[in-house]
Amino acid sequence: MSVLIVLFVFYLIDRALDLDLGFGFLSGPGGFAIAQQWVTDYQSSDTRWDAYLVGIVNTVRLILIGIVFAMVLGTLMGLARLSSNWLVSTIASVYVETIRNIPLLIQIIFLYTAVLLQLPRISDTYSAFDIFYLNNRSLALPFFDADGSAGIWFLLVALSAVAAWAVSRSLKRREESSGSNLHPMAMSFAVFILLAAITFVITGSPLNPDAPSLMTTGVGVQNIQGGLQVTPEFAAVLLGLVIYTSSFIAEIIRGSIQALPGGQNEAAAALGLNFYQRMTLIVLPQAMRIAIPPLTNQFLNLTKNSSLAVAIAYPEMVLIGSTIINGVGHAVPMFILIWATYLAMSLLISIVMNTLNNRVQLAGR
């Protein structure tokens, strides 16, 4: 309802001020290049819609990787804060209290200017085994080069994951009825690997190794070609988002664990379970029931904070949208489009997390 109200307000403004709120201008040629792309192959002669699509892909890439790494780092720091080792808990406490009280924009700019741009110049590139390269332009790593059948194989891999999930569900039901241990997780993982390997061969090995190499042009200019290249702009924004968000996630994990009855951990210890087993089998699964709602807020904050990448010229949606506005105007519809895109991504994250939250809640609550 709120979305309809906002759209109606924009309609009234359009009628009152006779503004052009159409999106037809996006079908024109972009007229600008985008250096940092992933998956897409945008050229300056392509439309502005294509340019904006690059911004969406770059933003989604940043958000998905950031959420995974922030969750892992935040969980580790949350557990470290509960450690009985004074040094470990103190380091984790200092990390949390320092990072979460420094503005994210300051952290991103510091990482970009004071750390990543201070790496060796490309003429002094650090190389390891002639397949890893590090300089102030990029971190180049070995990767894979996909051919035309890669899309089919990725689809088959997704179907393999569904088949593995079905096997796991079936084995768990048989375990409950028979009482025997059928190792559903191990068996489903084996099924997934087997199906992925078989489909990889059937589709003609669609992924080929692609190692980076340091090339020198005829005029003596050096450049790195091939492999997976991580630019300092992407690395600075990703590190900033991960480090900043993980400091809040650490407190969520710590609080969720401490909210559980102390007898849970003591009973697990009495059964002879080690620390890893107690955390992964007893404590964290129960703590997730408490942690998921506040974690959803942090994932949404990370999604919106990704717009700060414009400060160091990482080509996400805001930067590309601003470039289009500077070229052809139409600021109002462009910002409406950016607003709607962020809203759609945030609502999708909320739906996924709310679904997960409903799945892990105890019956009757």
Image: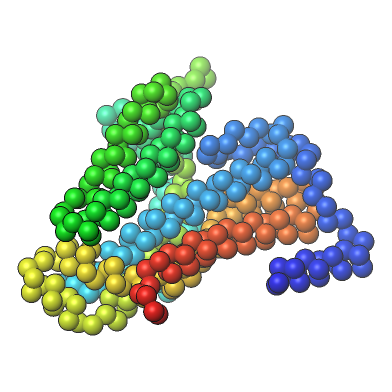
- Whether 316 is drawn above or below 211: the answer is below
- Count of numbered badges drawn on the protein: 0
Of 256 and 160, the residue lying toward us: 160
Image location (x, y in percent) of residue 147: 48, 24
Q: Residue 265 falls in which quadrant of the image?
A: bottom left
- Whether 204 is drawn above or below 296: the answer is above
Quadrant (top left/top right/bottom left/bottom right) for the C terminus: bottom left
Image location (x, y in percent) of residue 55: 61, 47
On the question of residue 231 being in view, the answer is: yes
Q: Residue at x 48, y 67 (%)?
A: 354
Of 72 and 114, the residue lying toward us: 72
Of 110 and 105, the residue lying toward us: 105
Q: Residue at x 30, y 50 (%)?
A: 170
Image location (x, y in percent) of residue 139: 40, 39
Image location (x, y in percent) of residue 178: 18, 56
Taking 220 as reference, is 96 left or right?
left
- Whether 211 is drawn above or below 135: the answer is above
Taking 125 as reference, is 2 left or right?
right
Q: Residue 74 falls in which quadrant of the image?
A: bottom left
Taking 7 as reference, is 284 left or right?
left
Q: Which colour assignment does the render follow?
A: rainbow
Quadrant (top left/top right/bottom left/bottom right) for the N terminus: bottom right
Q: Residue at x 49, y 61 (%)?
A: 352
Q: Tell which residue pokes out farthest to the top in this image.
A: 218
Q: Residue at x 13, y 78 (%)?
A: 266
On the question of residue 106 being in view, the answer is: no
